[in-house]
Amino acid sequence: MYATALYILKDKMGWEKSWEKLWSLRDTYKNAKAIRLSYDSLPKDLMSYIAYDNRFRFVTINRDLRTGGQDRKYLNPEYEGKLLLDEIRVLSPDIIVFQGKDGLWNCHIEELRREYKVVIAYHPSCYQYGADKLQYIVDSIAPQL
């Protein structure tokens, strides 16, 4: 999420050098470690410019697997989809990035696309172990912007 936000905001906020520093470490260190090693050159307030929400409004009681899609269920899909839509309209974002391609059926995607720039990407946890997540941002998320 941090790297995606940095990529999206780098030109607008003048954080190109921060992105370049992070990018320069991607061959040696994967993602989270690259962020930790770049900490001194990364914007500390980046997360103040984004809102993070979860389309699953509630977590299943007594979850066993604790792996997101494995045991999360909508309690009332119609109302939860409307709640998400209402929250998005209140926040009025420039860009909406859905991290996860499954389970979007009640998220009003087509309606959102009429009002906002919508990007649908894999959830970072779905990338194969050791995958170059920064490259995924450049190859798969950036073209949708």
Image (cartoon, rainbow, N blue to C red):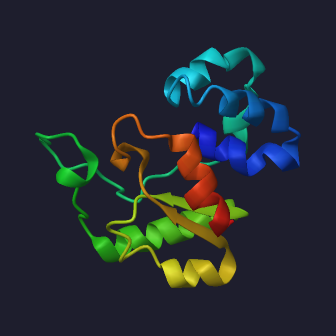
Residue at the (72%, 51%) spot, across then down: 8
Image-quadrant location for residue 55? bottom left
Residue 49 % position (x, y): 73, 44
Residue at the (66%, 37%) spot, across then down: 47
Q: Is residue 62 left or right of residue 112?
A: left
Q: Is residue 58 left or right of residue 64?
A: right
Residue 74 % position (x, y): 25, 64
Q: How many marks?
A: 0
143 is higher (above) or lower (below) than 54: below
- Please tell me which residue lies in front, 104 or 139: 139
The N terminus - image quarter: top right
Q: Is residue 39 left or right of residue 129?
A: right
Image-quadrant location for residue 57? bottom left
- Please tell me which residue lies in front, 55 or 4: 4
7 is higher (above) or lower (below) than 37: below
Residue at the (55%, 23%) spot, across then down: 28
Residue 45 % position (x, y): 74, 30
Q: Is residue 13 left or right of residue 49?
A: right
Residue 58 % position (x, y): 30, 52
Image-quadrant location for residue 35? top right
- Please tell me which residue lies in front, 140 or 121: 140
85 is higher (above) or lower (below) than 60: below
Residue at the (58%, 18%) spot, across then down: 36
The C terminus - image quarter: bottom right
